[in-house]
Image (cartoon, helix red, strand yellow):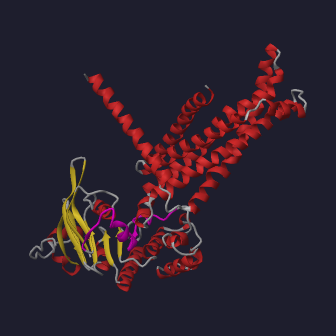
């Protein structure tokens, strides 16, 4: 009986947790009025613009490394010519969104959780309530929407930079002709490859912001509590991105 | 103006508030004292709606405070937090004008914020500083300016002198007394600093074992036996005045 009871308790607890997070996201996304435009604009800059360097650098090195790998692996069965197409498809469908999402998770989920967690332990969230401001609308809604809108944009820029990284290596050290490399990249790329990657980016953005806000608002007391919230936000958003990527890839391409 | 009747709240089966009865009249300054862990902050959170009570009622102007009526109450309410609770990402004037900016242009809100900062003894040069650049005393003053920015009818002060040296604590007490007298606002102060009680309060209520154990005018507290522990000296025993 005990294992059955424990399993039942765990299942109930899991269901309750998923339900609470789903309600949290729904409240965060759809309780828009009054919409705090200034807070939203600040988050567009924080989450989107300021993540551009790290996402760009990650994409550049990933595209370059991918070109080297495909060239060396393809040479085993005389298929080195597929470098431009595989780099483009690999970046746009998979590596651009996933690595971009993971980099944003590392940078943004931690900072959101730390900021909101600190606001909680220093009573700033209570202060919002006393100033007739709903903390969900002020803190959560702008972050969820900003992340959902800016991560796809970051993915798009990352895709371009990643392909550029492959092109730099392809033309600089693998002997590809520049125009032919770019033409091959374009020829094998379909619009759905790009759109699916951007949709993944939107979902990953939502996961990152949700984890940051959720763990920040539920942060424990003191510096240790904020530290735990920050760590949990990064781990949960990274695992969430990888799991969601698997599910979305199955949905989009199977 | 504010009436609390039979307020109860427990955490994990342990009662923190076990039937608190308290009333504060228009323009009155009430100090609530009690040892750490006696539920002073829980009482405050129940009034603000941050914690749901298990039982009892809180009335404001004769109407129960609930989800429907609380927004109107909060619109006439200001609060100074123990640690000031200024928003780190906003400048001092943006903190002070937080509520004003939601209904008026920035220039107008800033002018009011600068005026309120001056009222608490902070010059216009502090307006553009970030909260992290302020000392503890300056942060308290900025928090006080935020609390009075929208001319509230009710002001709460949560441990206003905690963390301040005696000189700064006295200045904050004088400021609070001046502001409360000037504005005619109802004030509720949560504290265990008896100097604050003497400086700020008209009335004092002792929260003990989840109930109001003593409630009376500040002028009589030196003769109240339940307050002896707080006053740090023996008191002349007077007949106990039951909680109102």
B67 part of magenta stretch = yes
Image-quadrant location for residue B167: bottom left
The residue under the point 48% across, 72% down is B142
User: Which residue of the protein is positioned furthest toward the top in this rendering?
Assistant: A77
| Residue A200 appears in view | yes
Give the position of the N terminus of chain A as an image quadrant: top left
Residue B114 percent location from the top left of the image: 54, 79
Between A82 and A251, the residue placed more toward the observer is A251
B63 part of magenta stretch = yes
Q: Is residue A23 above or below residue A250?
A: below
Between A215 and A134, the residue placed more toward the observer is A134
The residue under the point 34% across, 66% down is B70
User: Which residue of the protein is positioned furthest toward the bottom in this rendering?
Assistant: B182
Horizontal side of B66 relative to B132 (left or right) equals left
The residue under the point 59% across, 77% down is B107
Q: Is residue A53 above or below residue B112?
A: above
Horizontal side of B31 relative to A133 (left or right) equals left
Give the position of the C terminus of chain A as an image quadrant: top right
Q: Is residue B144 above or below residue A159?
A: below
Between B150 and B183, the residue placed more toward the observer is B150
Residue A236 percent location from the top left of the image: 51, 38
The residue under the point 63% across, 45% down is A151
Between A1 and A112, the residue placed more toward the observer is A1
The magenta segment: B62-87
Residue B184 percent location from the top left of the image: 34, 83
Q: Is residue A160 above or below residue B25?
A: above
| Residue A223 appears in view | no
């Amino acid at each position: 009986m005990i294992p059955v009871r424990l399993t039942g308790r765990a299942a109930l607890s899991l269901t309750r947790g998923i339900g609470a997070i789903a309600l949290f996201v729904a409240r965060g996304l759809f309780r828009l009025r009054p919409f705090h435009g200034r807070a939203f604009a600040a988050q567009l800059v924080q989450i989107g613009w300021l993540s551009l360097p790290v996402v760009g650098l990650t994409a550049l090195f990933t595209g370059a490394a991918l070109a080297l790998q495909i060239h060396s692996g393809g040479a085993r069965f005389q298929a080195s010519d597929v470098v431009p197409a595989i780099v483009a498809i690999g970046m746009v469908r998979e590596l651009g969104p996933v690595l971009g999402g993971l980099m944003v998770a590392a940078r943004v989920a931690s900072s959101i959780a730390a900021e909101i967690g600190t606001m909680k332990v220093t009573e700033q969230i209570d202060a919002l309530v006393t100033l007739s401001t709903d903390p969900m609308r002020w803190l959560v809604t702008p972050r969820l929407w900003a992340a959902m809108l800016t991560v796809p944009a970051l993915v798009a820029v990352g895709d371009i930079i990643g392909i550029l990284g492959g092109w730099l290596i392809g033309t600089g050290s693998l002997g590809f002709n520049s125009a032919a490399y770019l033409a091959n990249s374009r020829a094998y790329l379909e619009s759905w490859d790009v759109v699916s990657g951007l949709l993944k980016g939107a979902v990953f953005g939502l996961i990152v912001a949700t984890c940051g806000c959720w763990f920040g608002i539920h942060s424990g007391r003191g510096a240790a509590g904020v530290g735990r919230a920050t760590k949990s936000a990064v781990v949960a958003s990274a695992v969430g991105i990888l799991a969601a990527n698997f599910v979305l890839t199955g949905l989009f391409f199977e | 103006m504010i009436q609390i009747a039979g307020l109860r709240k427990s955490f994990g089966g342990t009662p923190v508030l076990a039937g608190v009865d308290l009333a504060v009249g228009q323009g009155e300054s009430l100090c609530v004292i009690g040892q750490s862990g006696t539920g002073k902050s829980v009482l405050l959170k129940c009034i603000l709606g941050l914690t749901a009570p298990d039982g009892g009622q809180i009335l404001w102007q004769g109407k129960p405070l609930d989800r429907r009526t609380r927004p109107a109450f909060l619109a006439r309410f200001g609060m100074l937090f123990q640690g000031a609770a200024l928003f780190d990402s906003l400048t001092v004037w943006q903190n002070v004008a937080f509520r004003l900016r939601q209904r008026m242009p920035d220039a107008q809100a800033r002018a009011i914020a600068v005026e309120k900062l001056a009222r608490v003894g902070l010059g216009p040069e502090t307006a553009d500083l970030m909260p992290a650049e302020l000392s503890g005393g300056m942060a308290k003053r900025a928090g006080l300016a935020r609390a009075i920015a929208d001319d509230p009818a009710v002001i709460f002060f949560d441990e206003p002198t905690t963390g301040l040296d005696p000189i700064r604590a006295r200045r904050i007490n004088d400021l609070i007394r001046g502001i409360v007298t000037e504005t005619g606002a109802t004030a509720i102060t949560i504290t265990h600093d008896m100097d604050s009680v003497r400086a700020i309060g008209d009335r004092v209520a002792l929260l003990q074992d989840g109930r109001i154990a003593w409630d009376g005018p500040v002028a009589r507290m030196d003769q109240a036996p339940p307050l002896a522990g707080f006053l740090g000296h023996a008191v002349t025993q007077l007949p106990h005045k039951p909680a109102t």
